[in-house]
Amino acid sequence: MSLIPEPDPIHVAYEDVRNDNTETSWVLLKYDEKTITIDQSGTDYQVLLDSLTNEERRYAYVRFEVGDEMSRRAKFIFLTWIGPSVSPLKKAKVSTDKAFVKGIFTMFQLEILADEKSDLAYERVSKKLELASGAAYGTGK
């Protein structure tokens, strides 16, 4: 049995997040028994954060708008969440399982592995993305 038995719906959700003409800004994957499936997608980053629990492992693909007052650009992160109460065996399995997800979520500027929600605060992630994106030009306003 494949870890991702139905990759097509996940790929469609990934493309929806990447599409400039949709409002969808994230897709969240979950483990369903021994497979990875779509849990949900949405537009509100806080809803994504609220969906991450201490007992679960999750993968997310998230769109951020970064830049300055002269130029705004879409940038993407690949997020791996390992809740602090996840067993050591399941934590270890993430390192191999993540490769299957990356086979679908192929284009991102930043990869984040987190077990604390404070690491995923919008401002903190946005700042990391800006730093990872190279030069930041602006008027200083």
Image: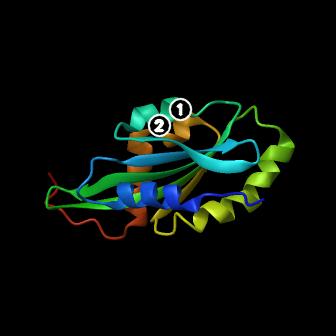
Q: Position of residue 109 (x, y in %)?
A: 45, 65
Residue at the image position 81 percent from the left and 52 percent from the top: 92
The residue tagged with tag 1: helix, strand or loop?
A: loop
Q: Report the residue marked by disc 1.
A: 51
Q: Position of residue 126 (x, y in %)?
A: 38, 50
Q: Amino acid at mark 2?
A: Leu
Q: Position of residue 54 (x, y in %)?
A: 67, 30
Q: Report the residue marked by disc 2.
A: 48
Instruction: Answer whether labels 2 and 1 touch (C-beta < 8 Å).
Output: yes
Density class for disc 1 (Cα within 10 Å; few <14, some 14-19, many ≥20) is: few
Q: Position of residue 32 (x, y in %)?
A: 69, 42
Specify the quadrant that holds the N terminus: bottom right
Residue 33 vs residue 141: left or right?
right
Residue at the image position 38 percent from the left and 67 percent from the top: 133
Residue 76 vs residue 88: left or right?
left
The residue tagged with tag 2: helix, strand or loop?
A: helix
Q: Amino acid at mark 1?
A: Ser
Residue 57 vs residue 110: left or right?
right
Foreground pick, 140 / 117: 117
Residue at the image position 53 percent from the left and 32 percent from the top: 51
